[in-house]
Image (tube, helix red, strand yellow):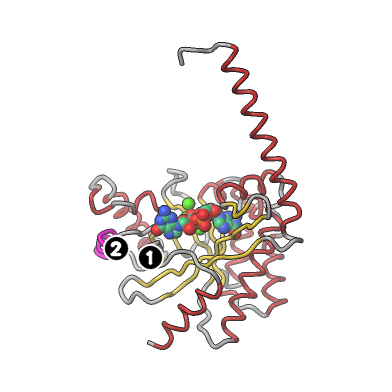
Amino acid sequence: AKNHGKGHLAEFNAQLGADSLRRMAMERKLKEAVRRDEFFLNFQPQFDLASRRIVGVEVLLRWQNEELGLVPPGQFIPVAEQSRIILDIGHWVLEQAMVQNLAWARAGLPMLPMAVNLSALQVHQHDLDEQIASLLRQHAYPADRLELELTESVIMDNAIPVRRQLEQLRRSGVRISIDDFGTGYSNLGYLSRFPLDVLKIDRSFVTDIHVRPQQQPIVQSIVQLARAFGLQLVAEGVEREAELDFLADLGVERVQGFLLARPMSAQQMAELLAAQQDL
Ligand code: C2E
Ligand code: CA
Ligand code: CA
Ligand code: CA
């Protein structure tokens, strides 16, 4: 920080202006995107580590826009959250995930739990539980085939109303999963207060775990926590065989990552499920 001259400030302002213009333009396009059918879902299988069979599927949202191309969720979800459009999009994702899984079941494929990511705004709607209950009813979708992925910060923020919602949902049979576990709050008290089913160990702990001894006790502690609270574990972001071996030794049962399968289209997912069924 040597130069605080006017030139830099002008540049900074120009950049800020360009960013907010881009943001506004994206927001405008996002508002149209549901109606224009620009969203679609990708699916990433989760495997049982020991048998390497697919035991679950995470749903990942994709946005294909005429002008912007394929926009990564990391770019458009924050904009969709700021403008609250995420509420419509999130509802669409939940419904499409159910519709897709039912279509697979009708085609004779196994109906595995679908894990759907929820944004903070969705969870803070006072009627999220009713919205989901109504979708389940409307589609006759089995509640225990739906897993909701929330981050720790979503849970901690405004915690009591969120807990009521989650309790209600869980009573109906829906499963609750903590995404990116270990990256959010250091206060773990919520583990005993919230109705939870799954912890997803964040990719940052998994990457190179076999050659990063300082990460190992962290993952070991997460495994112990999960055991103590009777939660299932999923390790995400597994890219190497050596990481997988290490996770197996630590007792992690479910894994997700590019090593075993990348996110894929519905068609590819169906083919993979069919191939597994024929084994
Ligand atoms: P996430 O929930 O942590 O999802 C996992 C992300 O890691 C996905 O990125 C996935 O493609 C990527 N991934 C999976 N395996 C590996 C691996 O082995 N290595 C690496 N490097 N990455 C891996 P994606 O699809 O770009 O999604 C990014 C984030 O966007 C998600 O992170 C989630 O927070 C958000 N997101 C995606 N779909 C939705 C949605 O429907 N609703 C909401 N609210 N958020 C979503
Ligand atoms: Ca997730
Ligand atoms: Ca995650
Ligand atoms: Ca993440």
- Disc 1 is placed on an element classified as strand
- Marks 1 and 2, how far apart at CA: 8 Å
- Disc 2 is placed on an element classified as helix
In percent of width and height, residue 176 lies at 53, 63
Residue in view at x 70 percent, y 76 percent: 137
Identity of the amino acid at label 1? Answer: Val
User: Closest to the observer: 273 or 71?
Assistant: 71
Left or right: where 128 falls relative to 248 = right
Label 1 crowd (10 A; few <14 / some 14-19 / many >=20):
many
- Does ligand 1 reach within 8 Å of label 1's beta carbon? no
Identity of the amino acid at label 2? Answer: Leu
Relative to 142, say whether 44 is above or below.
above
- Say if residue 193 shows up in the picture: no
Asked whether the beta carbons under mark 1 and mark 2 sit within 8 Å of each other, the answer is: yes
User: Closest to the observer: 193 or 50?
Assistant: 50
Residue in view at x 71 percent, y 46 percent: 27
Of mark 1 and mark 2, the one earlier in the sequence is 2
Relative to 159, say whether 46 is above or below.
below
What residue would you read off at disc 1?
255
What residue would you read off at disc 2?
244
Q: Where's the C terminus, which quadrant?
A: bottom left
Q: Magenta includes 163?
A: no
In percent of width and height, residue 2 lies at 46, 12
Relative to 10, say whether 57 is above or below.
below
- Say if residue 157 shows up in the picture: yes
